[in-house]
Image (cartoon, grey):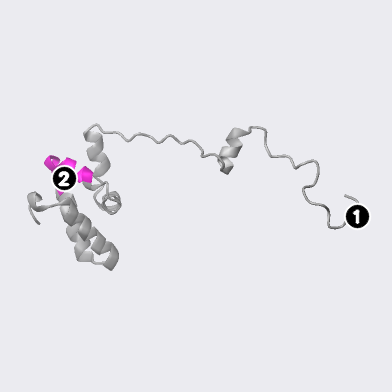
Amino acid sequence: MTSPSRISRARIVEQLKIAARKGDRGALMLAAEQMKTLAYTPRYWDKYLELLAHPLARLVDLLLIKQGDKIAHQKGWVRHKRDRRPATGTARGAKAAKPGGRRRPPSSPAQASLFPDLPA
């Protein structure tokens, strides 16, 4: 295992990309070992949390290491919950805007009937 001073975020991300692209288990294990070194050493927690901004590193943490949330909790960091407002124009937004139920069909047809002889 390499010393923590030689571990860099760029190298870990590079190894994760190689593992994802080529299926290289060696690259994945090397990146995971380096991530574990950062995750299990309180001195390097800040570097580890910065690394978790990358989606591949976050995935490895969620599946294998499982330290990111624990470290953030111990440091007193909390995630801000997203404000979930429905976008205008979507089905959910339309329901929230009109609490009356379904839209009523127009009283007169928008298109003339193809069979005018038949009763409506």
Does residue 75 sit above or below 23 in this rendering?
Answer: above
Magenta span has 46? Answer: yes
State which region is magenta.
38-50
Q: Give the secondary structure at mark 2.
A: loop
Does residue 68 sit above or below 97 in this rendering?
Answer: below
Q: Which residue is mark 2?
A: 40
How far is the residue under mark 2 from the one under mark 1? 80 Å
Residue that appears at 54% across and 39% down:
88
Could you say where residue 112 lies in the image, as x and y percent from the top left? Answer: 82, 52
Residue 43 placement: quadrant: top left
Query: Please, what is the three-letter code of the amino acid marked with disc 1?
Result: Leu
Look at the magenta stretch and give its main secondary structure. helix
Residue that appears at 28% across and 54% down:
56
Residue that appears at 24% across and 37% down:
72
Is residue 100 found left or right of 58 in the rendered image?
A: right
Q: Give the secondary structure at mark 1.
A: loop
Could you say where residue 55 lies in the image, as x and y percent from the top left? Answer: 30, 51
Is residue 42 found left or right of 69 in the rendered image?
A: left
Q: Which residue is mark 1?
A: 118
Query: Please, what is the three-letter code of the amino acid marked with disc 2?
Result: Tyr
Could you say where residue 84 lies in the image, as x and y percent from the top left? Answer: 46, 36
Could you say where residue 31 lies in the image, as x and y percent from the top left? Answer: 19, 57
Quadrant in which the N terminus is drawn: bottom left
Front label number (2 vs 1): 1
Residue 104 placement: quadrant: top right
Residue that appears at 18% across and 54% down:
10
Q: Earlier in the sequence, mark 2 or mark 1?
A: 2
Mark 1 neighbour density, 10 Å: few (under 14) some (14–19) many (20 or more): few
Mark 2 neighbour density, 10 Å: few (under 14) some (14–19) many (20 or more): some
